[in-house]
């Protein structure tokens, strides 16, 4: 079993880059996803947390990319027993 395969910092950076490419600010992303606070977006950007699956699906459509282009996985992650 793996502790966590998702790299939250790299995933946050991916979201930030995709927003930049689409010309969206953090506030724009908050509004598009129906979030109450822009702080959630900043937490994603910093890697403090990752978006829920429903928000990832919404970003997939918003950015016109697959979830695999948003979520970044650790490379050579060690198994936790």
Image (cartoon, grey):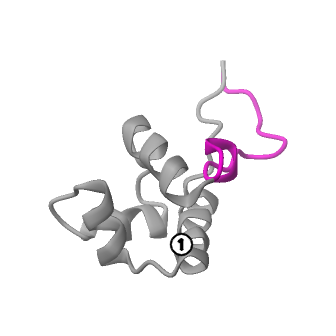
Q: Is residue 45 positioned above or below 49 on the image?
A: below
Q: Position of residue 3 (x, y in %)?
A: 59, 30
Q: Position of residue 54 (x, y in %)?
A: 38, 37
User: In the shown orientation, is residue 28 left or right of residue 56?
Assistant: left
Q: Quadrant of the C terminus?
A: top right
Circle 1 packing at 10 Å, graded few (<14), some (14-19), many (20+), is many
Tell me the chief SS of the magenta region.
loop
Q: Position of residue 4 (x, y in %)?
A: 59, 35
Q: Residue at x 62, y 50 (%)?
A: 7
The magenta stretch is 65-81
User: How many numbered marks are there?
Assistant: 1
Q: Residue at x 64, y 52 (%)?
A: 65
Q: Residue at x 61, y 77 (%)?
A: 21
Q: Is residue 20 positioned above or below 37 on the image?
A: below
Q: Residue furthest right?
A: 76
Q: Determine the image quadrant of residue 66.
A: top right
Q: Is residue 25 positioned above or below 42 on the image?
A: below
Q: Quadrant of the N terminus?
A: top right
The one nearer the camera, 26 or 39, is 26
Q: Residue at x 70, y 45 (%)?
A: 73
Would you say residue 33 sits in the magenta stretch?
no
The kind of secondary structure element at disc 1 is: helix
Q: Position of residue 16 (x, y in %)?
A: 53, 72
Q: Determine the image quadrant of residue 26.
A: bottom left
Q: Which residue is mark 1?
A: 16
Would you say residue 76 sits in the magenta stretch?
yes
């Amino acid at each position: 079993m793996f502790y966590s395969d998702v790299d939250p910092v790299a995933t946050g950076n991916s979201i930030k880059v995709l927003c930049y490419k689409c010309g969206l600010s953090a506030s724009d992303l908050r509004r598009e996803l129906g979030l109450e606070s822009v702080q959630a977006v900043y937490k994603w950007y910093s890697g403090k947390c990752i978006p829920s699956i429903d928000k990832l699906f919404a970003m997939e459509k918003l950015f016109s990319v697959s979830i695999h282009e948003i979520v970044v996985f650790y490379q050579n992650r060690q198994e936790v027993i």
